[in-house]
Amino acid sequence: MKKILVLGAGISGHTAAMFLKRYLGNKATVTVISPAANYNWIPSNIWVGVGKMAEEDVKVPLAPIYQKMDIHFIQGKAVELWPEGNESNSKPFVKYLRTDINSEEKIAEDYDYLIHATGPKLNFEATPGLGPHGGHSVSVCTPDHAIEASRQLHAAIQEMKNGKRKTLLVGTGHGTCTCEGAAFEYVFNVDFELREHGVRHMADLYYITNEAALGDFGVNGMHLKVGGYVTSSKIFAESLYLEREVKYILGAHVSKVEKDHIEYETLDGNQHKLNFDFAMLLPPFKGNQLNSFAKNGEEITSKLFSPAGFMKVDADYEPKSVDDWSHEDWPKHYTCPLYKNIFAIGIAFAPPHQISVPRKSPNGTLITPAPPRTGMPSATMGRVVAKNIANQINGISEQKTCSMAELGAACVASAGSSFFKGTAATIVMSPIVPNFSHFPRTGRDDNETYGEIGLAGHWLKRILHTVFIYKAKANPFWWIIPE
Ligand SMILES: Cc1cc2nc3c(=O)[nH]c(=O)nc-3n(C[C@H](O)[C@H](O)[C@H](O)COP(=O)(O)OP(=O)(O)OC[C@H]3O[C@@H](n4cnc5c(N)ncnc54)[C@H](O)[C@@H]3O)c2cc1C
């Protein structure tokens, strides 16, 4: 019986594990190694971060789901990869540390197929003073972070109610961050919360971003259909910020976060300072690289992982100028070129290059969003890679593709408190990586790339929360629900 090991029970890995079991039944054993006891539906952390949802609403215990599905779950953190085995073990294996008991002992788990789905390493260290672990800003990347963000936000709201004016800052905490969509969504939730508490007039609300223009989102912006006409995401986003009176700082690299102010450099090379009372700044991401070894013990980590710690897959990593970028550079199967039984999906795979045009300040500081790998494509990669592994095990030659130049993504910046109260800016695009061969005008499908504003978007996001948590719990007919 084949043994499939999945590292990471996040959006991509959990989806892959569930589909592997569905496709293969008892033809294979599926083992998941992941450090936390719970699955986190990360997109809804935004609502935890403004106090509209509780931690329990965005977390699902993994053990009962895996028990129900006959998936072996190990609460642990993978630390080493031996893709050829070693002198005493001829099978490839991963070494992990148990996190349920905080053990230092490295335990080996072998595999026939490996899916590396370990998501991002939140790199708060990139900016001095950034982040909730000893720094001066908050984050919404994990439920714990989001609870603290909500606590600090509501403390500031209370002071505003007592007549103190406050400066609130939301955005990216480094020039190379990704996930601008999350910061975009959070800033509008903060705006909504301030209005609900009747203190919007007491707040200066800023959005600070490494994007050169609003609406870039790390995908070089897009042209959207809005109410029957086509406009740029820049104009669409600018009007949202104007309407909600959110001030914005563009092309910014936050270089330091102090107790009450940030220092940042802008694309023109100028240095600035801004005081704040509350700051939610996202960290840049690194990959969770595993120290990797050949059979003879030689270290091969740099052959498998990019310098940023993401796993290299079937992408074209040859350095190219922007003019030579092609949708063909992007991976289709997420297979490791050196070991065809290893796959990397979701945020864990190394993108071939940015999607936004790379920009540097005159001082040489890189200020450009890294390519986003959002929930929908990450989960789709999980399903497709599961299908391809199942086909290989079943002797079926078909291998499906799911390039980010084929996949779409949606960003629903939803702020609201009920089905009757709230609003959302919905942006849908397809494909994520522009494909000028298929769509010569803009690189994207006009009919599948659109924006909308209104309460319906809030309903959609709320319904998606319920539906995706239902799916993550492997409740009846979970597999019918699309990614
Ligand atoms: C605040 C926020 C809001 C977002 N909102 C949206 C949204 O509205 N829509 C959208 O499409 N996307 C959104 N995203 C992006 C989305 O969350 C990611 O695209 C998605 O989680 C990526 O899936 P993943 O499986 O690659 O990583 P993750 O979901 O992060 O999962 C990685 C898993 O690997 C585990 N892991 C880490 N290290 C190891 C190790 N060494 N060994 C084993 N396991 C390990 C982690 O604990 C985790 O369980 C948002 C992101 C953030 C931060």
Image (tube, rainbow, N blue to C red):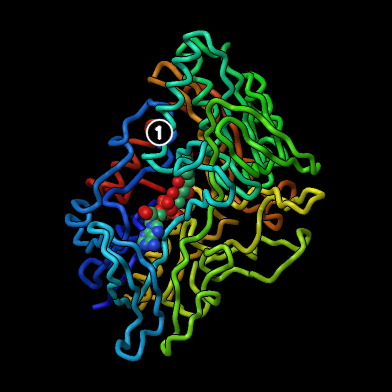
What residue is drawn where x is 39% and y is 36%? Answer: 464
Secondary structure under badge 1?
Answer: helix
The quadrant in which residue 46 appears is: top left
| Number of numbered discs overlaid on the protein picture | 1
The location of residue 51, given as percent across then percent down, is: 38, 26
State which quarter of the image contains the N terminus: bottom left
Within the image, what quadrant is residue 243 found in?
A: top right
Q: Nearer the viewer, residue 423 or 35?
A: 35
- Residue 375 appears in view: no
Which amino acid type is marked by label 1?
Answer: Glu
Q: Residue 57 in the image: x percent, y percent?
A: 30, 35
Residue to which mark 1 is pinned: 148
Is the C-beta of the residue carrying label 1 under 8 Å from the nearest atom of ligand 1? no
Residue 458 visible in the displayed image: yes
Q: Is residue 206 left or right of residue 196?
A: right
The percent position of residue 112, horizontal first and vertical second, equals 33, 78
Q: Nearer the viewer, residue 99 or 420?
A: 99
Q: Report the residue at 51% width, 63% height from top.
A: 349
Q: Residue at x 35, y 81 (%)?
A: 92
Tell me residue 451's x, y (percent): 59, 32
- Note whether 174 is above or below 207 in the view shown: below
Along the horizontal axis of the image, is 390 left or right of 433? left
Q: Nearer the viewer, residue 470 or 82?
A: 82
The part of the image, by quadrant, that contains residue 294 is bottom left
